[in-house]
Image: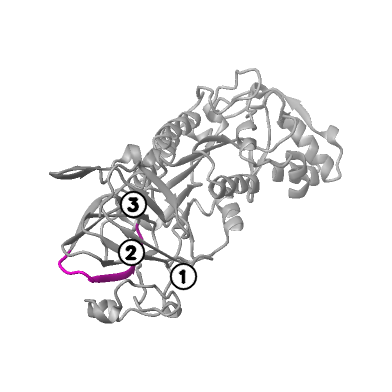
């Protein structure tokens, strides 16, 4: 019998992510009423904001009708409109809880949230039972499903009515035993810009498992309108956007301006639409160039952006777009060093070739190695830190480019005094093409990322290891 007057409450079960819910039902002699799905209240009570897109109802005439065990690659909110059921849920996801079982009775005053990959089944305990479920994806023949036999001996579900006495479809009777079940894999992570400096560091950090995909510009063109429909996006849990146009001086030319806006803004907008529509976490890498460098002291994540040049303007615009995605991390960084051509390799090469360089000494910041950015991204995702903007650079006392060049010379066994400091204006005095304005202060505060438990490596230690 339906219990009236409960308070809304969510309770964890023995299966990770499977939540049983007590629902307030209001009734009298005329019947009853309940809010079967109320996003604001239920999210506040602890239900994931899973974004349902479809509502289904299964009506069952007789007592003992038994259906399942089906695991689909989407989340479900399961409840009963009329009648009563015995439900059994089996974890069919890859991982340590594979095969775990949870059972409970559901009536109109109790519902359950079934996460992606957990097998769902039920047996009706009253006639004329209407079983309802909200799902957050549309059915697709391309989706990966898993099924388990209702009579599997390993899970040994204690059905109230023996299976030999109830109505079961021939299809459900033919499902495999647990040992033969294909587990539902976790949602995938897609790294865009996989051939860049950060993309290569992310590949090193995550490896080449089935849960990770790496896309180059040849694989994905963010400016292509067909990109949005190029994949079954509900199979992805995270997109890491490591692609960007970073030629700050060329961005000041007409052609460069077009390319910078296409990659850094139009591309970011396409990813933001996909992430928002499909409940994906979007990780986007930004830059110190969103600031004008006039602040005294470190820039925090809350400081207003004031970009000087085209590159900084496109990065600031991309940040604003990505910030509208419900699940987003924006990683602001500076002076990035990774595999390929970069400042440190250039200085080391000049030292070895006997060239005594003039290096800018009126810009201050910290080096950031791509290994640290990759580690910070992985930390934020794995710890499920609050969404938002995070500064990520190397730690330690800020330095000028000239001081860092001297450190490279010394670390490679050369005289640091061979490096001469010059102003930015003097350095670019003989430039024949456009020169983008640079922020003089690129120092980013690390307090917010450190508060999550991530401690960036000291940049001079990372520099020594890199060399």
Task: Say which element carries label 3.
Answer: helix
Q: Is residue 321 above or below residue 57?
A: above
Of residues 4 and 381, the one nearer the viewer is 4
Of residues 390 and 382, the one nearer the viewer is 382
The stretch in magenta equals 60-74
Q: Earlier in the sequence, mark 1 or mark 2?
A: 2
Residue assigned mark 2: 87
- Point 49% across, 32% down: residue: 311
Of residues 94 and 389, the one nearer the viewer is 94
Q: Are marks 3 and 1 in contact (CB under 8 Å)?
A: no
Residue assigned mark 1: 99
As drawn, which residue projects farthest toward the front?
29
Task: Say which element carries label 1.
Answer: loop
* Marks 2/3: CA–CA distance: 40 Å
> Residue 169, image x and y in percent?
22, 77
> Residue 141, image x and y in percent?
27, 67
Residue 209 forms part of the magenta stretch: no
User: Looking at the rendering, which quadrant does residue 146 occupy?
Assistant: bottom left
Classed neighbour count for the residue bearing mark 2: other residues with Cα under 10 Å, few (<14), some (14–19), many (≥20): many
> Residue 379, image x and y in percent?
59, 47
Left or right position of 174 against 47: left
Residue 397 in sight: yes
Q: Nearer the viewer, mark 2 or mark 3?
A: 2
Q: Quadrant of the N terminus?
A: bottom left
Residue assigned mark 3: 227
Classed neighbour count for the residue bearing mark 1: other residues with Cα under 10 Å, few (<14), some (14–19), many (≥20): many
* Marks 1/2: CA–CA distance: 16 Å
> Residue 78, image x and y in percent?
30, 55
């Amino acid at each position: 019998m339906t219990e009236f007057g409960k308070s809304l409450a969510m309770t964890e079960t023995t299966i990770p992510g499977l939540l049983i819910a007590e629902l307030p039902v209001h009734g009298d002699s005329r019947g009853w009423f309940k809010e079967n799905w109320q996003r604001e209240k239920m999210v506040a009570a602890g239900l994931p904001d899973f974004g349902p897109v479809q509502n289904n109802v299964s009506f069952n005439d007789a007592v003992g009708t038994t259906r399942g065990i089906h695991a689909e690659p989407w989340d479900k909110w399961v409840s009963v409109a009329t009648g009563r059921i015995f439900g059994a849920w089996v974890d069919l996801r890859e991982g340590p809880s594979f095969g775990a079982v949870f059972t409970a009775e559901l009536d109109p005053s109790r519902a359950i949230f079934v996460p992606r990959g957990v097998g769902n089944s039920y047996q009706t305990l009253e006639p004329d039972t209407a079983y309802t479920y909200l799902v957050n994806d549309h059915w697709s023949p391309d989706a990966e499903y898993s099924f388990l036999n209702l009579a599997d001996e390993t899970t040994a579900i204690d059905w109230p009515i023996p299976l030999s006495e109830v109505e079961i479809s021939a299809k459900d009777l033919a499902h495999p035993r647990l040992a033969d079940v294909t587990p539902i894999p976790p949602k995938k992570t897609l790294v865009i810009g996989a051939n860049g400096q950060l993309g290569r560091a992310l590949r090193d950090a995550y490896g080449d498992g089935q849960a990770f995909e790496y896309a180059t510009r040849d694989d994905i063109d963010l400016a292509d309108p067909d990109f949005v429909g190029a994949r079954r996006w509900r199979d992805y849990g995270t997109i890491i956007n490591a692609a960007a146009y970073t030629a700050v001086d060329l961005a000041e030319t007409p052609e460069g301006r077009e390319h910078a806006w296409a990659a850094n803004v139009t591309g970011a907008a396409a990813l933001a639409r996909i992430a928002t529509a499909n409940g994906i976490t979007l990780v986007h890498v930004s830059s110190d160039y969103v600031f004008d460098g006039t602040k005294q002291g470190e820039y925090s994540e809350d400081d207003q952006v004031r970009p000087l040049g085209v590159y900084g303007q496109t990065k600031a615009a991309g940040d604003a777009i990505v910030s509208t995605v419900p699940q987003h991390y924006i990683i602001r960084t500076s002076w990035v060093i990774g595999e390929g051509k970069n400042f440190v390799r250039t200085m080391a090469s000049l030292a070895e070739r006997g060239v005594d360089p003039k290096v800018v000494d009126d810009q201050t910041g910290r080096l950031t190695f791509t290994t640290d950015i990759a580690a910070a991204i992985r930390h934020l995702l794995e710890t499920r830190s609050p969404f938002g903007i995070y500064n990520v650079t190397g730690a330690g006392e800020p330095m000028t480019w000239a001081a860092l060049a001297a450190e490279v010379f010394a670390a490679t066994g050369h005289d640091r005094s061979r490096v001469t400091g010059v102003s930015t204006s003097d350095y670019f005095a003989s430039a024949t093409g456009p020169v983008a304005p640079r922020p003089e202060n690129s120092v980013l505060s690390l307090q917010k990322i450190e508060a999550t438990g991530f401690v960036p490596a000291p940049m001079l230690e990372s520099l020594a290891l890199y060399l």
